[in-house]
Amino acid sequence: MKLKNNKSTNNIKTFSDQELREALFDVALLMERALVPLFVLGKTARHIYKYEENLDGDDEIRVGVRKAELRREAIVTIEQFKPDMVVSEFQMSYSFNDIPVIIDIIHTDYAVLKHPDTRYYYTEEFKIPNPWDQYWERREYMK
């Protein structure tokens, strides 16, 4: 793992754009294999929302999936590809080249996820919450 400029802020590691991008594409591929649609959330989504190609300096990749989409077959597929996945009621997580990849399991129907915005990031199409400002203000309360 490379730390950007060998810096670490408050013991939080930061990663290069390429490392973060690879982690984002890894979780997207994982969910595609499991046939589970995902939403990009958190700082990662903010970059995509602002049409910023560079993810430099972030400390994680965060996405979300609806609980209803996590059928038994999907979970079996995810476990096959990521046997080290840590699972709780509200989250799944794993590391991709030391980058924390957090998958929030969304239990509630939120208005910001009913009609998500579609944004392109490199060669992939991602869904992000819409309207964005409403999501960003309340992102910490989504479960």
Image (cartoon, rainbow, N blue to C red):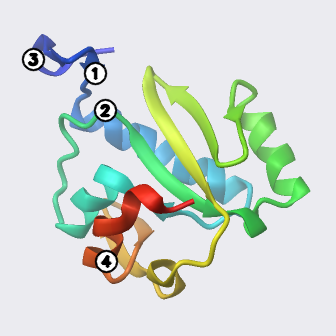
The part of the image, by quadrant, that contains residue 105 is: bottom right
Disc 1 to disc 2: CB gap under 8 Å: yes
Q: Amino acid at mark 4?
A: Gln
Q: Residue 41, relative to residue 138: is it above or below?
A: above
Q: Which residue is mark 1?
A: 12
CA separation in Å, label 1 and label 3: 14 Å
CA separation in Å, label 4 and label 2: 23 Å
Mark closer to the observer (4, 3): 4
Q: Residue 99, relative to residue 58: is it above or below?
A: above
Circle 4 sits in a helix, a strand or a loop, which is it? Answer: helix
Location of the N terminus (image quadrant):
top left
Q: Which residue is mark 4?
A: 134
Q: Which residue is mark 2?
A: 59
The spot of residue 102 in percent (x, y) is: 52, 41
The spot of residue 61 in percent (x, y) is: 41, 42
N-terminal of the two: label 1 or label 3? 3
Disc 4 to disc 3: CB gap under 8 Å: no
Circle 2 sits in a helix, a strand or a loop, which is it? Answer: loop
Circle 1 sits in a helix, a strand or a loop, which is it? Answer: strand
The spot of residue 110 in percent (x, y) is: 53, 78
Q: Amino acid at mark 2?
A: Asp
Circle 3 sits in a helix, a strand or a loop, which is it? Answer: helix
- Foreground residue among 3 and 90: 90
N-terminal of the two: label 4 or label 2? 2
CA separation in Å, label 3 and label 2: 14 Å
